[in-house]
Amino acid sequence: MTQDKDGNSEYGTRPDPAFANEDGRLSFRFDSEILYIEAWGANSLRIRASCLASLPEREWALTEKTTGNKPAVTIKGNTASITNGKIRADISRRGKIVVSNAETGKVLLEEFARHRLDILDPKCSSLRIQAREWKPRLGSPDYHLTMRFESQDPSERIYGMGQYQQPFMNLKGADVELAQRNSQATVPFALSSLGYGFLWNNPGIGRAVFSTLTTTFEAYSTDMLDYWVTAGDTPGEIVRAYTGVTGRVPKMPEYGLGFWQCKLRYQTQEELLEVAREYKRRNLPIDLIVCDYFHWPNQGDWKFDPTFWPDPDAMVKELKDMNIELMVSIWPTVEKTSENYDEMLRRGLLIRQDRGIRAAMEGRGYAIHYDATNPDARKFVWEAAKRNYHDKGIKVFWLDEAEPEYSVYDFDIYRYHAGPNLSVGNMFPSDYTKGFYEGMRETGQEEIVSLVRCAWAGAQKYGALVWSGDIASSWGSFRNQLSAGLNMGLAGFAWFTTDIGGFHGGDPDEPAFRELLVRWFQWGAYCPVMRLHGDREPKQPRHGTTGGSFCLSGGPNEVWSYGDEVYTICEKYMRIREAMRDYTRALMKDAHEKGDPLMRPCFYDFPQDDKCWKLEDQYMYGPKYLVAPVMAPQQKKREVYLPGEGLKWKGTDGAEYEGGKTVTVDTPLDTMPVFERL
């Protein structure tokens, strides 16, 4: 095709045949690649490409198409564009995409291309680097896909992307694994300080790098590029747009607003009931108690072991009479000794492996996981859970091991119903949660919350309450959980919790651990869900010889297990949490209707305050409370920045403070700094 000096083709100013307006969807074809850009929600675009003969139709994290504003498609000469409200995408004659704010003209995303295929591109280069790089995987129909963007500003700040065990929120400069692990949840939605949100809508194992020069997303095995981008004036507008197309949390049940008691693990029915009775005898507010794992005869039985839990119906009734909900743990693992193993193997309901023995997790022998991406497997497991738990009045489940956790994370050897783990693996926890959500919905239950150890984009609409996994009982780990919770909220998961005190270790008799427990407990009162859990030291004697009894119980982990001083402080914060019930309920309503996270960075409510974008050790619990956790031992004072020049704040000490200033406050052991916006 010949061109004149202005870059027009031999067709003159007529549209380039590489472009087409397909009823409001802009398409581009060159060589083996086909690319579509279309409106998907208000002020948002979905961009897809493939080297297949036709584009696969998959929604992945996205809900069905919504358009918002009517998009405008323009094809002129060698370029084309599509505009949807505040967002615009331009495509060059060789397919380079630039996304900008349609109202301000500010470039939000620009593909990083360094080649000589388009000599009219000002960034024409001999480097031969493609923005969309499709590297075939030999012997497979899939590609190793790399998507590169120019970094528009080295001081850009990136948030979201799920939960990673690190002490900082800002991901600019980070190299992030896109894979699910115990205590790591990949939710590939990034919120930028430049005014856009970006969803990498690909559930394959991969990598994201946010460098000062480029932003790169990789999928190690895929047949399709798929991402969604939105433009917004505030972080709230961006998050609401994102949750509008991926889904929002359901209505939180009333028992989700108060205190949850848990430990590893109550070994018998009577032990669990006696703990619940003691909370009531002490007149302490409690909404829920948890029956943790290995309460079953074998992994994959999904039922109570009658040796240790002889009358679950009576247990559930007594708890309900005390107005305490019972949560039970579900594991996706199936042992060969399980009553369900043979049938599940025969029907193809278990995860397969391309090499090695059929064993994914080492424990008491070896177990494999049921295949949550298989609708028949989801139905099978739910029917067992319904028969053995739900029909007894148990309405809330702890979906543990949701990554799923492998003894060795060799992502390339597992094969699911939906495809190879390398191509689809990150969606496993979403399908796991979906199976129980749909099962409970079929029974008529509407308020659904499942405690889940991992999640992928969109799982929030299935009632996923994500907790941060099996973390250490340490100050460093405590600090990491604040970043994890705030970034999860920005990634669409308004419901978040942690193991108060950490999971691994911690002796209730040690003064140093008691201090950590107190500070974590205080913070827990201002988390979306307040839940005490942990595997404390020393381990308790084994009770029995059969079933799950080989899994020893950790030490005591009730609020009275840490001495009188700790007990008094815990009671204080349990009652603070209870006093906030109406406020928390209102925040849960906003999360359900708008997608707003309950705990969020200060910049969420004060986006015009530059200092708020740099605050990483304090946050807002809804629009009313500013929370400044104490996350270091023996800390007697701490600095707190109060946003909003001209605003008034009331401190925990009862004094009033002016906004727009940094104050230093005392932090005695019995007090965590909290400021109320007046």
Image (spheres, rainbow, N blue to C red):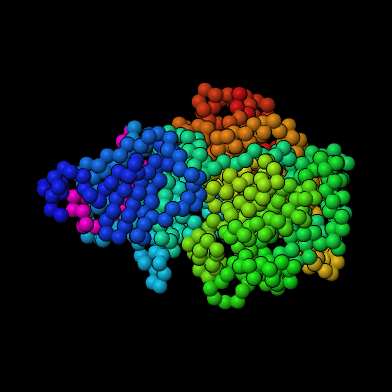
Please provide percent x and percent y for residue 323. 81, 40
Does residue 663 show up magenta in the picture? no
| Residue occupying the point 50% across, 68% down | 412
* Residue range (magenta): 104-122
Q: Is residue 84 above or below residue 297?
A: above
**Front residue of this view, candidates 126 and 573:** 126
| Residue occupying the point 51% across, 28% down | 644
Which quadrant: the C terminus? top right
Q: How many marks?
A: 0
**Front residue of this view, candidates 33 and 467:** 33
Q: Is residue 361 above or below residue 448?
A: below
Snapshot quadrant of residue 138: bottom left
Snapshot quadrant of residue 663: top right
| Residue occupying the point 65% across, 41% down | 527
Q: Is residue 447 left or right of residue 114?
A: right
Q: In the image as oriented, which residue stretches furthest toward the left?
A: 4
Q: In the image as oriented, which residue stretches furthest toward the bottom?
A: 356
Please provide percent x and percent y for residue 161. 50, 49
Asked if residue 671 can be seen in this view, the reply is yes
Q: Is residue 284 left or right of residue 415?
A: right
Does residue 116 show up magenta in the picture? yes
Asked if residue 184 can be seen in this view, the reply is no
Please provide percent x and percent y for residue 296. 77, 62
| Main SS class of the magenta portion in the image | loop
Which quadrant: the N terminus? bottom left
| Residue occupying the point 22% across, 41% down | 76
Please provide percent x and percent y for residue 643. 53, 30
